[in-house]
Amino acid sequence: MEMRRLAFWVVLLVVFSACKNKPDGTSAKVNKTPKISPDYSQLTLPLNIAPLNFKIEEEGDAYFVEIGNNPETSIRIFSSDGIIKIPERKWTELLAKNVNGEIEYAVFVKKEGSWNQFQSFTNQVSESKVDPYLYYRLLYPGYESWTEISIKQRSLESFKERTVVENNAVSQNCVNCHAFNQQNPDNFMFHMRGSMGGTYFVTDGDLEKFNLKTSEMENGAVYPRWHPSGRYVAFSSNKVVQQFHSMASKKIEVSDLNSTLILFDRDKNEILDIPVNKERKFMDTYPEWSPDGEFLYFCRAAQIGPGYDYRDTRYDLYRVHFDAENCEFAEPELVFDASGKSKSVSFPRVSPDGKSLVFTYHDYGCFPIWHKEADLYRVNLENLQTNKLDLNSNFTDSYHSWSSNGRWMIFSSKRGDGLSARPYISYIDDTGKAHKPFVLPQEDPTFYSHFLKTFNIPEFAKMEVSFTPGELRKAAAKKAVQPEWASN
């Protein structure tokens, strides 16, 4: 009874303090919108996104925020330090009540005993949901070692995060290049390099390791993309070098020495060369399927020779028609001539409706994540017209992927500090226009100011991937399945 009485008085004191610290209607007007971090103003939000917690970056002694348009249903939050944490249940209800409408944020700051009201800002609520899960690779931004590398799963509807693959569980081996088949976790794969190296496939919950390099191949298989049928996976087979610079603007450069495209037939357990470069005049990399599986897009540059300058290597966007029934490829055709503009493209990603393709556009090379100038561009695949998306910044924007409904794009951006990449989400409307992006919400709105790791290859997913660390260790300990090389 004594504990209940104490709890009652604590709750009463909190309520009384909150009421006492609310603006009383006589607030002075401030002719500007408040500075908040992250910047969650003037956005289009998915109906099912987690609360967008933020910090008010205005000097004051107390803070008060009212979120919503109806006094009866709005969310009211008092804060002594400017940190605004929105209750998840109330936030979910608020979004549902304002679908296809907007929600208003009224911000008050108390200073020297008086409340000041800043100009309100709003967010639009879209009826289009985002896929409920996000997968990304977490690692330190330097890439010099394999310390603490993991693939994480994050719920976009809450703040729950769990580890899918942790390299500490597999002898510190490097894990990378995870890929889904159209956001479907029943077709999921990732690479591992090192003593337990191989390509790991998850099929209907079962985990199996493959060695996707035969004696006929000069290099291993990387950069995977699933054919929509689930039968085939296209890879590039690359020989790359990593160079470290002393320049502050560019720390690392990753360059291709040679690369070809290969196809893994999962039904036959065979690997075959994709015959688009029979005379080996080109370096072909970054395959990407159209959603109907009829076209394979890829990036192509002229084969470099001895004494090459990596700054002169530039990739164009190509595609080739694919007959899945007979496993036959036609002749490749140019889609976008980047080298003619003294530019280069990488990471082509086709929208789920097959009407748009977004690539990373940068000065040279094929690995732009350390290129400050890297931006995202869209190709209209119906007329091949190209435009720069409005979601770009003055820092690296790359590693993009689509949601299953084509309404949301997630990408990695270094706009925060120029060093660590963070995942940003942008609404893509019917015209292909990208709306103002917002960083992945965290329960602690100051999270990104002190979290050192970088987010790579963010990918949406419809459901959870389910295997345990024990199942991973068991699969890693087994001998890898060895596919056969199939001659064309």
Image (spheres, grey):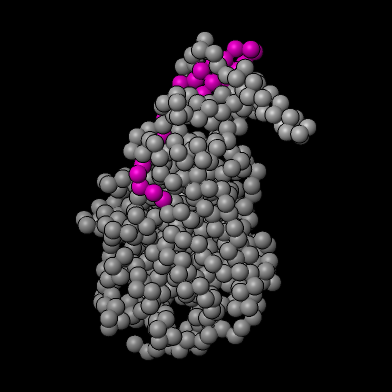
Spot occupied by residue 470 in the image (x, y as percentages of width and height): 65, 72
Asked if residue 114 is among those painted magenta in the image, a careful observer would answer yes
The reply, left or right, for residue 230 in relation to residue 77 is left
- Vertical side of 205 occupied by 272: above or below: below
Q: Nearer the viewer, residue 472 or 306?
A: 472
Q: Nearer the viewer, residue 450 or 5?
A: 5
Asked if residue 165 is among those painted magenta in the image, a careful observer would answer no
The residue drawn where x is 37% and y is 89% is 487
Task: Tell me which corner region of the image, top left, top right, bottom left or bottom right, holds residue 466.
Answer: bottom right
The residue drawn where x is 30% and y is 56% is 356
Residue 217 seen: yes
Q: Quadrant of the N terminus?
A: top right
The reply, left or right, for residue 198 in relation to residue 237 is right
Secondary structure predominantly adopted by residues drawn in magenta: strand
**Residue that protrudes farthest toward the front in the picture:** 1
The residue drawn where x is 34% and y is 54% is 406
The reply, left or right, for residue 163 in relation to residue 2 is left
Q: Quadrant of the C terminus?
A: bottom left
- Vertical side of 302 occupied by 218: above or below: below
Q: Nearer the viewer, residue 318 or 78?
A: 78
Magenta region: which residues? Answer: 107-130
Q: Nearer the viewer, residue 406 or 455?
A: 406
Residue 368 seen: no
Spot occupied by residue 107 in the image (x, y as percentages of width and height): 51, 24
Spot occupied by residue 309 in the image (x, y as percentages of width and height): 48, 63
**Residue that protrudes farthest toward the left in the picture:** 383
**Residue that protrudes farthest toward the top in the picture:** 26
The residue drawn where x is 58% and y is 35% is 85
